[in-house]
Image: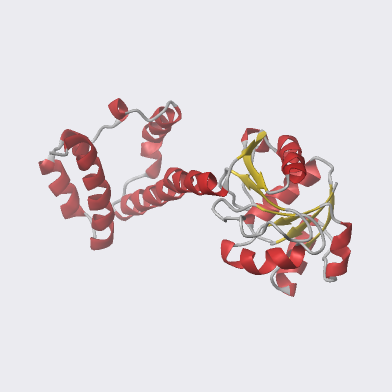
Amino acid sequence: MKIAFVGTGNVASQLVKRIQELNLEILGAIGSTDEKSQTFALKHQLNILNDHSELVQADLIFLCVQDARLNEIIPIYSEYAPVATTSGSFDISVFSQLKHPVGVCYPLQTFTSEAIINFEEIPFFIESHSEQFSNSLIDLAKVIGKDGILMTSEQRAKLHVSAVFINNFTHHLNTLAREFGEFNNIEFSWYEALIKETFRKVLNGAKDIDQTGPARRNDSASIEKHLSLLNSADKKVYEVITNSILNKFHKK
């Protein structure tokens, strides 16, 4: 299988490294600008596919770009070869009658370009109007990652929302906590045991019985004390999440 890449961001970087690790053939890559193409190609020792006609040699084109660009580029690149977006929330239903099949091969993971990623733990979620192409993507997902799982665009969008809560929002909250601690001369390393225990509970199912804290106890005195220590932006975040917990456990 010859694979081409459109996009030069974090997802593309990690997939390229994994595919090279597996000794699968990469035809080359295309970035949104010549500069990005050159930088990416040099970093990963790839060909730059300046001439789109080279794409006819590809068996698969991975589209690792922002969702806002997909409506524009899917019709363009599907003229050359089958294409698969790595998007978590993009709906491919409007692209069922193009020259080559269109699909989704969404890895459920957070990616930064330099992180060490264990792909053997990552499930990929697959969709296509073509059963043959779906099966090909499932087979590829099983080689690259842990598994390939069929899922509709509607269900995958809901999966993506959950992933945003689990990863993106959690990361942001930890960033706010670290910044608050640094401002108040609190070492972030002191939270290590707490972080480990929190995510042990999360991985075991995050049951209601595991929820603790002032909002869970309806401890208004502690909540007011905390609010008095926060700046206006962080206070709003604290209030939204506190109210969500209060509504879950103490709704009248």
| In the foreground, 23 or 76 | 76
Residue 68 place in picture, x, y as percent: 57, 66
Specify the quadrant of the image occupied by residue 21.
top right
Q: Residue at x 15, y 37 (%)?
A: 218
On the picture, is 4 further left or further right than 204?
A: right
Toward the bottom, the furthest residue is 34
Residue 182 place in picture, x, y as percent: 35, 52
Up-down: is 64 above or below 195?
A: below
Up-down: is 24 above or below 146?
A: below
Residue 193 place in picture, x, y as percent: 39, 31
On the picture, is 39 further left or further right than 104?
A: right
The number of callouts visible is 0
Q: Residue at x 85, y 71 (%)?
A: 51
On the picture, is 29 further left or further right than 175?
A: right
Q: Residue at x 21, y 42 (%)?
A: 247
Residue 71 place in picture, x, y as percent: 62, 66
Up-down: is 220 above or below 194?
A: below
Specify the quadrant of the image occupied by residue 54.
bottom right
Toward the left, the furthest residue is 221
Up-down: is 161 above or below 204?
A: below
On the picture, is 94 further left or further right than 220?
A: right
| In the foreground, 234 or 95 | 95
Colouring chosen for the image of the structure: secondary structure
Q: Residue at x 77, y 68 (%)?
A: 38
Q: Dividing the image into 4 quarters, which one contains the C terminus?
A: top left
| In the foreground, 250 or 210 | 250
